Amino acid sequence: MSGQDMNGQDFGPKRCGLVGGGVIGAGWAARFVLNGRDAVLYDPSPDARARAEAVLGMARAAWAGLLPGALPPEGRLHIAATLEEALEGADFVQESLPEIQTLKCDVLERIDALLPAAVPIASSTSGLLPTRLQARLRHPERFVVGHPFNPVYLLPLVEICGGARTSEDTKARVAAFYRAIGMQVLHVRKEVDGFIADRLLEALWREGLWLIEEGVATTAELDDAIRYGAGLRWSFMGTFLTYRLAGGDAGMRHFLAQFGPALQLPWTRLVAPELTDALIDRIAGQSDEQAGGMTVRALERLRDEALVKVIRALATVGPQGYAAGATLNRFAARRADDAQGGQPGADGIPASWHGVVPPEWIDYNGHMTEHRYLQVFGEATDHILDAIGAGPDHVAAGQSFYTVETHLRHLGQALCGMAIMVRTRVLDADGKRLHLFHELTAAGDDAPLATAEQMLIHVDTARARSAPIPQAVAGAIAALRTAHSALPVPEGAGRAIAMPRRS
């Protein structure tokens, strides 16, 4: 086992058995493989291999843009000939069969009989109650619902719902595993048909069917009503927080007082119309027209490209990212820690910053653009300031360090997808000044790609004047300076820009 849950306990399956290789099962396989797990998939369909390999290819392309270079070496995808082969040696099982309760119960009973009691079994069911699905299992305590969303390899949400006999330990272990592969876990507090997200989607779907049946709108018009309006907000702010903003400074209470009475008006028809042949033909025809001749694969690639860009954009919102962007940043930080571990280099200095060069940092020459080096070194400086007690609380108290001089040297190339890290040394300090030297390298390599030498001065921000460094901060600086003093002066320290002249 590898990876850790919130309590620091190891749980990170390395061999995942998958039962059912449709869109969801193949999506799970891709997410597992890209996170370094072996995925052994069983599906009797003759198309199972081609589908799984196609989805894995799309997932690779998507992750190359989403988080380039941050994933571990890939696991292996294996298509099993039998259920027994898929489960042999598995330390985690994800079932993704069609939504037929009798079929699921029959196969889950076979899975339960073949596995050691400690191996968790998760079902991708989108709405069947786990208490019913676990009813015939010898070890019902290890069964839980892990309901994802399509495409599984990109959308981070997974709903976890336990049945009456599911143990809390199982829910915690499975949640830890999902988080370790980049997912956002939503615990369903109480068993309910359809869980949470699909019940919301179902309400929208029912109303959409009624509007089409009544001739109010077409499939394309309904989708436009979502993607040009609420859908843009939903990627980062759900309905309730959006409505809170609509209430102004008085918030949700004012919104409910102002707009609550409208809920009594007969606006919606949340009873799905009968799916007659005529309605099915109308919906299918409109959908064909809406697709404009694009194949399903082309639409999937378009969807993935859009999702990657939306999630990456959300990763840049605020100090830690927002919504799915924050989930991505946490995942990226864990991956960087796993890959590098903040491990010291040959000089014994741990990383003050690490990350991966994303595509948008690349300039017209094909390597990291100049201002991104300054950004990375600035973030490394912030890490050092946090470490010496001069972080946000220090700034809030009216004191800060201002950078008054920076000297950058570009010695190599940081390329797209490269895992990079910064190590920082305290070269000198006095009562008001702090002298830092940063080295940027590829992860696991001590050869510098760039260096930055910085002089910072301590400032009383209210008076906008230099000020003595507080004793506690000065003591932390002195400790770092002492730790770094035994090291040789880094090559390039104290350098100035000059063109040598021949006499």
Image (cartoon, rainbow, N blue to C red):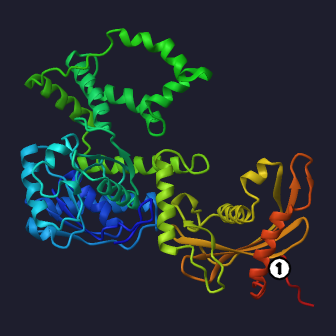
Find residue 42 and report its image quarter. bottom left
| Nearer-the-camera pick, 88 or 46 | 88
Q: Would you say 496 lies left or right of 260 here?
A: right
Is residue 52 positioned above or below 246 on the image? Answer: below
Mark 1 element type: loop
Residue at 62 percent across and 22 percent down: it is 249
Task: Indicate the position of residue 350 as horizontal and vertical percent values.
Answer: 63, 76
Q: Is residue 79 visible?
A: yes
Is residue 439 positioned above or below 247 on the image? Answer: below
> Quick one: quadrant of the C terminus?
bottom right
Find residue 204 and report its image quarter. top left
Q: Would you say 480 lies left or right of 463 here?
A: left
Is residue 38 positioned above or below 166 on the image? Answer: below
- Count neighbours of disc 1 (C-alpha within 10 A) and say few if under 14, some if 14 to 19, many if 20 or more: few
| Nearer-the-camera pick, 120 or 370 | 120
| Nearer-the-camera pick, 443 or 368 | 443
Q: Give amino acid for label 1.
A: Arg
Residue at the extreme bottom:
503
Task: Indicate the position of residue 317 as horizontal and vertical percent values.
Answer: 57, 46
Q: Which residue is mark 1?
A: 495
Task: Indicate the position of residue 241 as horizontal and vertical percent values.
Answer: 50, 31
Q: Would you say 84 lies left or right of 301 here?
A: left
Residue at 50 percent across and 29 percent down: it is 242
Task: Indicate the position of residue 95 as horizontal and vertical percent values.
Answer: 18, 55
